[in-house]
Structure formats: structure tokens, C-alpha cells
Image (cartoon, rainbow, N blue to C red):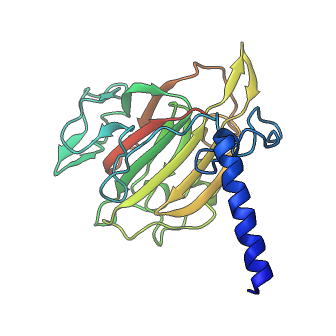
Amino acid sequence: MNRRSLFSTIFASTAAFAQQAKDPKRFNQATGYSDTPIIPFQRWKVHDIDRPKPPVVTPANVVGGAPSDAIVLFDGSDLSQWTFRGKTGRPRQSWKLENGTMEVVPGAGDAQTKESFGDVQLHVEWSPPTEISGDSQWRANSGILIMGNYEIQVLDSYNNPTYADGQAGAVYGQYPPLVNAVRKPGEWNSYDIIWEAPKFVGPDLAKPAYVTVMLNGILVQHRKEVIGRVAHRVVGTYQAHAPELPLSLQDHDVPVRYRNIWARRLVL
């Protein structure tokens, strides 16, 4: 840098500091600005000094753990956050709590949260049995029923041919996963799901649901527009319901284990 450029730089910096001293609200980059243009489709200016700051959320100490603002639905200690609906003609019973996991007891019916959710971030870990039993849709079949109506499929899809929109990571009966990312039988898989709940005006659908799904850290559904409620062999449709409903884990009459389940309500 030559002497003239150096002098110009020093002069500009000195002038900026002088202006900042006169009007720190306008020039303090650490806190924001008040003289910038409005961001399109927002009411805030670029780098707006008055824009509310994001709340602080403390992440977990371990990958996949519940952050500080999460609702812990299952931490391995008890089933107090769940009810079990039972199946017609079968004894009412809970799922098995063992070694920090909750396991489907075939015939016990779906496990349903006592809490209700609308827009939500959901983390669920699940594992099929180590020993393979059955094939296609009878191999560790379960499902995450968001709002009790919309299913993200749980299935042992490892070397297990079945229809594409019924594999693990599928929006069941609607969208296959982008890739088959399941681990070997007996190993743990993780779902991270972002759910945008449908909106209704009276009996009419005003906005469909959208879902994003990560399976074992791999994107398998990218903000897909959900067609309707889960259905088998037909196209699902919407039916108006409350803005928040419980989540369910499906009992499909085969054993599957779950652990480390938590949710964060979202404001989207």
C-alpha cells in the first residue's frame, strides 16, 4: 500500500469513528443499523437494530440429544408421556420398557402421546430386531403417525424388497424416500422430522401439510406437500381436524424398539 492509499484509509476510518460517536445507533455494526432499506416481504430493515433477537436454546451435550427447549417424550426411564389405545378384541396393555427402550408389544395398539402438537420438530430413534423375521411389509413395520393421521414409515428396509412408497423414510403411500439410508438389522436409526401442519377453515383445507425428513442424517424427504391422511391401497384425503393433535407410534403386530424421542413446538 502506498503512502497516499494508507493516508486515505486512515482518514476514512477516522471519519467513520467520528460519525459513529455522533450517532452510535446508526453506525454501530455490532448492534445493527437504522438507516438501511426494508427487506422485501418483511417489516424489518436490513441489519435492523430494533429487530428482536432469537431466543437462546442450549444444544444437548451429545449428538441427537434433546435441546433445552424440547419436550422429552421418552428418555428411557418410563412411559409416563404415553397412552396405549389397544386393539379391538385384545387385552389392553402397555408396550415393553426394557434397557432404556420402549418396544412394540404386538396387539397392544398404537402408543400415543399425552401432549398434542401442530408445527413441530421431532427426533425419534428406532431399531428393528437383530434376527430377521418376515419380509416386505412384515419386517419390523411400524410408523410415526404425526397428528395421528400422517405416516412416516418405519420398516427394516435393509436388503428387503418392498414397494417404494412403503420403505423406511417414505411418506407412506405417497412419496418414496430419496434414498434407502437404513442401517443393518439390530442397529439404531434416527429420524429428524420438520412438520408443517395443515390448516383448515371450517371443513375446507386452506393449506396442506409439508414435511422434511432426515434419516440417519441423510435427507430423504425435502419439504414434500402431503397429499392427505395415511391410507393403504387408496389415495389419502384430508379431513378437517384440530390444529394440534397427539403423535402416535404404530403397532403393526411386529416388534420394533424406540428410544430418545423428543419434540420442539415450532412457530413457522
Residue 156 falls left or right of residue 149: left
User: Can the viewer see residue 250 in this picture?
Assistant: no
Q: Tell me what residue is drawn at x 74 percent, y 30 percent.
A: 207
Q: Quadrant of the C terminus?
A: top right
Instruction: From the viewer's side, name the closer residue of 14 and 175.
Output: 14
Residue 140 pos. (x, y %):
39, 55
Residue 145 falls left or right of residue 100: right
Determine whether 257 is above or below 49 in the image.
Answer: below
User: Can the viewer see residue 13 in this picture?
Assistant: yes
Residue 4 pos. (x, y %):
80, 80
Q: Tell me what residue is drawn at x 63 percent, y 47 percent.
A: 28
Residue 130 pos. (x, y %):
28, 66
Residue 120 pos. (x, y %):
52, 37
Q: Tell me what residue is drawn at x 69 percent, y 63 percent.
A: 13
Instruction: From the viewer's side, name the closer residue of 216 and 53.
Output: 53
Q: Tell me what residue is drawn at x 56 percent, y 45 percent.
A: 194
